[in-house]
Amino acid sequence: MTKFQLWWASVIVLIAGSIYLLYPSINWYQMDPKERTKLEANRLRPKNLLNLGLDLKGGTHLVMELDVEKLPPNSDITDAINRAIETIRNRVDQFGVAEPLIARQGARWIVIQLPGITNSEQAKDLVGRTALLEFRMVDSSEAGQKAMGKIAELGNPFVGDPNNPNSVLTVRPEAQKLVPAGTAVLPGREDSFYIVSASAPLTGASLQTARVETGGQFGLPYVSFKFDQDGGRIFSALTAANVNKNMAIVLDGRVFSAPVIKGRIPGGSGIIEGNFTLEEARKLAIVLRSGALPAPVRIIEERVVGPTLGEDSIRQGVRASFVGLAIVIVFILVYYKLSGAVAVGALLLNLVFLLAAMAYMNSTMTLPGIAGVILALAMGIDANVLIFERIREEMRLGKPVRIAISSGYEKAFSAILDAHLAEIISAVFLFQFGTGPIKGFAVTLTLGIAISMLTAVFITRLVFESYAAGGSIETLSI
């Protein structure tokens, strides 16, 4: 195999590999949106997929503030923020959101972008729940039963809406006076309330796993859980000491269920029932598995980008890209003739290779990312202009075509390298210090510039030298 044959084989392999990497993305976005949603819910997305960002796909943008005043005394705020980000990221990853952005902003704020999640209430419930799971004993004493009756006569014992899971509830002073010492009154589901022990002998910190099961009461889904070794030992002792009593399963200060302990429960496993829908049970299992937030969070900014706006952005971005590309192609073909056709081919290969590389890395395409792609393509064309002008100079000096081609590439290379390195350095700083959209621009720009060195310098030179090697060539259409 000759040198040219080996190089052409390498180029063909690159093209075939790029098509192979891009096919899942092409197939995915041609699929019916309902089918895509179903596959995403089951976490059956293709392995190599070019994702669409919030500004293209639509979704939810949240800014959350950590309530640092409710952190334990002497807590490190930076550590608490980092733990909150990790907890939220675990929840989002288990929920199956593709390419979310979760980042710290300022001293106590967290920015969250969830592409594809346009139901803001669903998003807030998923990432904002504190998820403090506690196991408390229901007060079944005579004093507790009397207090229940007196509190019931007062009506709603809470300030706030007990039917709203996101509402902050406080006990009314007149109801608090009736609660026996060492106990607390907590809201339940459907306007109910419970008097339970003030302290929790066991919390969700000892949970090992939580998952959704079906076949519970009336066939409704429920959440099964299992403790680690230490938690299982405490749970076993707690159930053994309280047979025929009610144990309240409390999540974020609300009683989800209060089953009767019919005997010691060994093995450290149990269930949480609460007339859940399948989606409610799934979200509850996610927040329990991911752990509790170190402190409550407040939503201070909320913005929903509808999928229609995203589709308009894609349509306008693609239209602008094609118009700009068409103008460049016409100019190159008119001004550089057949050599311009070689540059156009390199430009198209640059685009294919760039999108394939982004699909391989599961990168996210955003509007700034599209701008990075266009700039990278422009750098590739610029490199070809430098090369062609150098070749023209050499030919005007009367040099043979083969020597003019070789000399043109060699003399233009230093200028091309300098320009590309300057762009890459700028992109590195943008990625290091920029936010999500700016980082997307930097990634596509860096990849595109690196690939343009391959297409504009190597592939076009391969075409010209293969042409010149075919015999005694006296002219070149340039």
Image (cartoon, grey):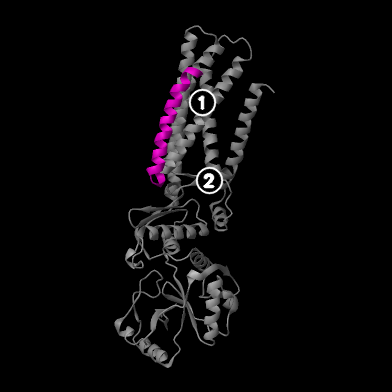
Local crowd at mark 1 within 10 Å, few (<14), some, or many (≥20)? many
User: Residue 318, can we see it?
Assistant: no
Task: Tell me where residue 247 appears, x and y as whole percent.
Answer: 49, 81
Three-letter amino acid code at the position of disc 2: Asn
Q: How many marks?
A: 2
The residue most toward the left is: 173
Vertical relation: 275 (above or below) 59: below
Labelled disc at residue 181: none
The residue most toward the right is: 1
The residue most toward the top is: 398
Please state, as top left, top right, bottom left or bottom right, where the N terminus lies in the image. Answer: top right
Residues 166 and 80: in front is 80
Vertical relation: 176 (above or below) 66: below
Task: Tell me where residue 233 appears, x and y as whole percent.
Answer: 55, 76
In this figure, which residue is indicated by the disc labeled 1? 456
Picture quadrant of residue 2: top right
Task: Tell me where residue 24 appears, x and y as whole percent.
Answer: 59, 45
Q: Is residue 88 magenta?
A: no
Three-letter amino acid code at the position of disc 1: Ala
Residue span colored magenta? 409-437
In this figure, which residue is indicated by the disc labeled 2? 362
Residues 390 and 166: in front is 390
Picture quadrant of residue 119: bottom left
Instruction: Please name the predominant secondary structure of the magenta segment in the image.
Output: helix
Residues 398 and 347: in front is 398
- Residue at mark 1 to residue at mark 2: CA–CA distance: 25 Å
